[in-house]
Amino acid sequence: MRDMSERVIPLIDERQRKIGSHIPVIPAQLVAPNGLLADTRGRRLHDLRISVTDRCNFRCTYCMPKEVFDKDYPYLSHGDLLSFEEITRLAKIYIDHGVEKVRLTGGEPLLRKHLERLIEQLASLRTLSGKPLDLTLTTNGSLLRKKARALKDAGLTRMTVSLDGLDDAVFQQMNDVGFPVGDVLDGIEAAREVGFENIKVNMVVKKGTNEHEIIPMAKHFKGTGVILRFIEFMDVGASNGWDMTEVLPSAEVIEKINSVFPLTNIDPNYPGEVAERWRYLDGSGEVGVISSVTQAFCKDCSRARLSTEGKMYLCLFATEGHDLKALLREGKSDLEISNAIAQVWSHRTDRYSELRGSPELAGKAKVEMSYIGG
């Protein structure tokens, strides 16, 4: 295993790069949404991921390395953030286009003050079929012991916790702030205690860093009802020093687990689900793998992303955003904003994972994951 005390990361300071952004065009003829919005490849809009803060109390090397995201980093001011009312208004407009699932992300979303108020507002919304939203959240788990009850009472449906290993030295090295793994595990237990049943744990696997944690993680969560998912180290953003040599293919992850705990492949929960699902043969639960590098999953992607400052992005690896906050604060009507969103999505062509490494992508700045969530 690589000496984790030595790390060479070719960093690009995102403060020196410009991500393209423009205000979406509102069509001259406005049309009421019908819940059937599709892009140029026939991909329907179904999921909305909302980043509620660009701040985080971890400095994970694959997301917000401290060499870039330091005390002098120009984080967004409170006035630059979408208000809870603005977020809820946009969510309602997206629902009219067929969105049924909303995920709150960050940064670390639990750092956003009074987040449970936003959850209450979103939980009151209904899909076009009259059902409650599938309302979920991704968190590093550091504040879960304190926040779990309030999140549950506010109406949060599910949650995903990021956890990159059980060995404390490995975990602290990866979060790069010395946060102990025991506190995250305690947060997961707190969530279970207050009644969260659909908990997922995501582990980013970096070859040479934490792949030896795969089996211990599988053993720990096996039989608990918590679904563990392994994510290939991605070339997201511009600051994480991504190198293909640090990618452990998901196929190898499954091989490792299957050699100890036999698995069988199972069907996805819904079309476009990015995680490939595997069930333990003894019936003690399941694991998943997200092959973000070795297997492109663009063809069924149904996700729009709303950044911390109110820009609509069409891909995790996007190079430009569409400024919806400007429309909100210029006083545009819901129908006008709805048509602007439809205009953007209907022209969507994004398929980064299928084009990774191609000349047409060379030199293009990608938005940081902390602005649009993972």
Image (cartoon, rainbow, N blue to C red):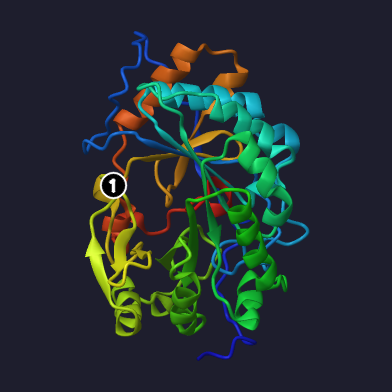
Secondary structure at numbered mark 1: loop
Residue indicated by mark 1: 272
Point 69% across, 41% down: residue: 150
Whether residue 147 sits left or right of residue 87 in the image: it is right
Is 133 in front, or is 330?
A: 133
| Total numbered circles | 1
Q: Amino acid at mark 1?
A: Gly
Q: Tell me residue 276's x, y (percent).
A: 30, 60
Residue drawn at (46%, 21%) of the image:
93
Horizontally, residue 224 falls left or right of residue 38, namely right
Q: Nearer the viewer, residue 307 or 108?
A: 108
Residue 18 image position (x, y, % from top left)? 55, 48
Horizontally, is 89 left or right of 262 in the view? right
| Residue found 50% across the figure and 91% down from its top | 1
Q: Position of residue 148 (x, y in %)?
A: 66, 49
Picture residue at 49% right of the left edge, 53% below the top:
374
- The single residue placed furthest to the top in the displayed view is 29
Say left or right for 146 vs 158: right
